[in-house]
């Protein structure tokens, strides 16, 4: 019986960890809807540039080759001139330039590969794109943390805010609410700009949307082709069904 209680308690704790992150006041942070435009080549190209400039320093995309970026409208020369580091070649995979041992010492763990991150973060709360879109827009200054940053979507995150120069510094706005007879601080969904960034809030949101679009596309580069082919297949099946139905009626019209 004691063993069963331990197992049940372990399942409860695991479920609590999976159900989502919590804010300082204890309430879950709702995920913002990410603009899903994986067929927008300009958005994907800008997202690829942001990924190489800000993410690839620490995070790899070991299942994605540079030359696959030709699928989003970039030429091989553009990839070489704008997205490759000095020693990389266009046919190689996207590998991080950071030393894994140094990364573990700095962040406590080696930064994860991001090839499938948009698919891996999907949950009952929203898609992986929704999570990433919210995560990259909910960083705030926290001097109690080693990195100087914290995140509402991922409390106590070990990753610093690599896009802070673009977004600037913001502070989440809380309000007091009663919960179980006690006053708690609850996030209102509003932010106070402490220091401006190089981009306006709307420009930053657009840049994050482009980056998330690219991460979503990178998880399945053939998704747009798959959807397009699927539509034609369904139209063909609908037409074939109509023809088969009329042929069946013609063949059996004299049979009673």
Image (cartoon, rainbow, N blue to C red):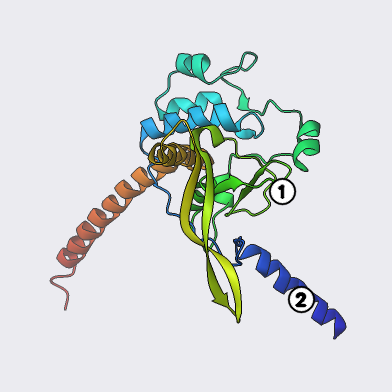
Q: Residue at x 58, y 21 (%)?
A: 91
Q: Residue at x 71, y 67 (%)?
A: 14
Q: Residue 230 or 33: which is nearer the viewer?
A: 33
What SS does tag 1 mark? loop
Let me know if residue 56 appears in the view. yes
Q: Quadrant of the N terminus?
A: bottom right
Let me know if residue 163 appears in the view. no
Where does residue 119 sit, x and y in percent of width and height?
55, 49
**Which disc number belongs to residue 144?**
1
Q: Is residue 214 above or below residue 191?
A: above
Q: Quadrant of residue 98?
A: top right
Q: Quadrant of residue 70?
A: top left
Q: Is residue 248 above or below residue 106?
A: below
Query: In the displayed image of the protein, which residue is found farthest to the bottom?
Result: 1
Q: Is residue 176 left or right of residue 203?
A: right
Q: Residue 174 or 147: which is nearer the viewer?
A: 174
Q: Residue 101 or 139: which is nearer the viewer?
A: 139
Query: In the displayed image of the protein, which residue is found farthest to the left?
Result: 254
Q: Is residue 195 left or right of residue 4?
A: left
Q: Nearer the viewer, mark 2 or mark 1?
A: 1
Q: Is residue 69 above or below residue 179?
A: above
Q: Is residue 44 left or right of residue 218?
A: left
Going from N to C along the chain, the mark reached first, 2 or 1, is 2
Could you classify mark 1 by the number of other residues whose Cα lies within 10 Å: few (under 14), some (14-19), or many (20 or more)? Answer: few
Q: Quadrant of the C terminus?
A: bottom left
Q: Is residue 172 above or below residue 82?
A: below
> Which residue bears the numbered disc 2?
9
Q: Residue at x 15, y 64 (%)?
A: 250
What SS does tag 2 mark? helix
Where does residue 46 sit, x and y in percent of width and height?
43, 30
The Cα atoms of the two marked residues, 2 and 1, are separated by: 31 Å
Q: Residue 12 or 248: which is nearer the viewer?
A: 12
């Amino acid at each position: 019986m004691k063993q069963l209680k331990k197992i049940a308690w372990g399942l409860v704790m695991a479920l609590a960890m999976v159900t989502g992150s919590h804010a300082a006041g204890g309430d879950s942070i709702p995920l913002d809807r990410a603009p899903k435009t994986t067929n927008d080549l300009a958005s994907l190209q800008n997202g690829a540039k942001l990924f190489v400039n800000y993410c690839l320093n620490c995070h790899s995309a070991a299942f994605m080759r540079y030359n696959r970026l030709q699928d989003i409208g970039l030429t091989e020369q553009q990839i070489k001139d704008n997205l490759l580091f000095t020693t990389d070649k266009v046919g190689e995979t996207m590998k991080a330039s950071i030393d894994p041992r140094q990364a573990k010492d700095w962040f406590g763990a080696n930064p994860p590969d991001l090839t499938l991150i948009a698919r891996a973060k999907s949950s009952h709360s929203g898609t992986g794109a929704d999570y990433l879109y919210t995560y990259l827009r909910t960083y705030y200054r926290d001097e109690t943390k080693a990195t100087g940053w914290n995140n509402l979507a991922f409390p106590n995150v070990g990753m610093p805010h690599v896009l802070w120069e673009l977004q600037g510094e913001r502070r989440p706005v809380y309000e007091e609410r009663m919960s179980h007879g006690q006053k708690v601080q609850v996030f209102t969904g509003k932010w106070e700009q402490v220091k401006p960034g190089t981009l306006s809030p709307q420009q930053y949101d657009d840049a994050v949307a482009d980056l998330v679009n690219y991460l979503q596309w990178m998880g399945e580069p053939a998704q747009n082709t798959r959807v397009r082919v699927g539509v034609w297949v369904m139209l063909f099946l609908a037409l074939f069904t109509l023809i088969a139905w009329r042929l069946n009626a013609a063949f059996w019209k004299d049979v009673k």
